[in-house]
Structures are given as structure tokens and as C-alpha cells.
Amino acid sequence: MLKIIGASGQIKNVDSFIEQVNNYSKEKNIVTQALDADMVYGKKHIISAVEHAKRAITQKKNTTNSLGMEILLYASGERQLMLAIPKMGVKKGKSNVAFVFADGKISDNIIKDFLEKVSLNRDDKVLEGNINTLKKFGINSEAISTVSKNKYEDLILEKVAMVDIIK
């Protein structure tokens, strides 16, 4: 099962936040990945990253040792974690976070409980990308000008797919 949600709030310490996420995931036996939602251009962006990550693991072409980290890698459009983490990882301070819940039983109650544990509020609107998302992602104005606004998401999906080629 795959569930993608957005949330917002204050992250005081990134390391302890990630530890909370990992501990909860282990406790509930689910895969959970947190991403900087300001770098996400819609749910299709994340769905594509999950599909590519699962395929890489199935084909034994994965770069990382976990589904969560492989999702982060593909979502970032990068082939190296040292580039992917600063780009797509959660940030300290007031943050918008995209959560990917995969491989496990994920109910609305689990999500509600999870958000309470990490002290964030659900806000799926943070998953909606815009032209600024594209620019922050590293897509230049020239590339953006080559497509109509309803195709902006395709520019991100192309970056996700390119990870297979540059691996």
C-alpha cells in the first residue's frame, strides 16, 4: 500500500526528527520517508520515485540499502545521496514535509497518530508544485519555457526517470 501526505510545522532538530520517523516506522512495520515538500511537484512526482525505487530494488540495481532512501534518491533526481539529502531532505525550522508511507498497513488512524508523534499538522496543499518548485529543483527558465504550464510536472518526472540512466 502507498499513501502520500503533506504536513507542516516546526522541526527543531532534523536528526531527532528523522530518528522519530524511523522509530515509528519500525514500531508499525512500515516504510516511511520524509521529504522536503517544497521540492515536490505533486503526488505523481512521488509515485514515480516510489515505482522507480521498487523496480531498482527488484532488479538489484539499487544504490542504497533501503526502500526509503532509494525513494529519496529518485525523488531528488540525483544519483548520489550526498546530493539527494541536502536537496530533498527535511530542513530545520518551519517546514513543509511530504511523507511517503509504503509497504505496510497504513490507516488514517496510523497517519493521525504519526503526525501527533512528530508534532506536525496535515496539509496536503504543500504537495502542490509551482514554477518556483521547478527552479529550486534545478530546472532552468529555458527548459521551463519549452513546455506549457500543464506539462510542468513532466519536467520533474523526466528528472526522476533520468536517475536510472545516470546510475
Image (cartoon, rainbow, N blue to C red):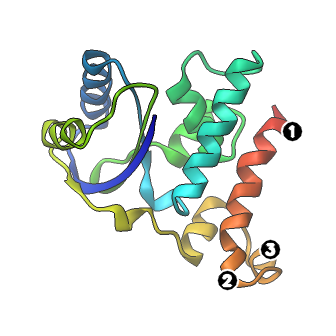
Label 3: how many Cα within 10 Å (few below 14, some 14–19, many 20+): few
Q: Which residue is mark 1?
A: 165
Confirm or deny contact between disc 1 and disc 2 (CB under 8 A): no
User: Disc 3 designates what residue?
Assistant: 143
* Residue at 46% across, 26% down: 103
**Which is more N-terminal, label 2 or label 3?**
3
Q: Is residue 158 left or right of residue 112?
A: right
- Height in image: 62 above or below 113? above
Against 15, residue 74 (above or below) is below
Q: Nearer the viewer, residue 12 or 151?
A: 151
Of marks 1 and 2, the one in the foreground: 2
SS state under label 3: helix
The amino acid pointed to by label 2 is Lys
- Element on which disc 2 rests: helix
Is residue 154 or residue 145 the one in the foreground?
154
Disc number lying in front (3 or 2): 2
Is residue 9 rendered to the left or right of residue 132? left
Q: Amino acid at mark 1?
A: Ile
Q: CA distance from mark 3 to mark 2?
A: 12 Å
In terms of image quadrants, where is residue 152?
bottom right
Q: Which of 29 and 166 lies nearest the eye of the viewer?
A: 29
- For marks 1 and 3, the one nearer the N-term is 3
Cβ atoms under marks 3 and 2 closer than 8 Å: no
Q: Percent from the top left, x then y, of residue 83? A: 62, 39
Given the current orientation, which residue lies at the most extreme right position?
Answer: 165
In the rendered image, the quadrant that contains the C terminus is top right
**Which mark, residue 149?**
2
User: Would residue 138 be found to the left or right of residue 3 on screen?
Assistant: right
**Rendered location of residue 134, percent (x, y):** 62, 68
Q: Residue at x 83, y 80 (%)?
A: 146
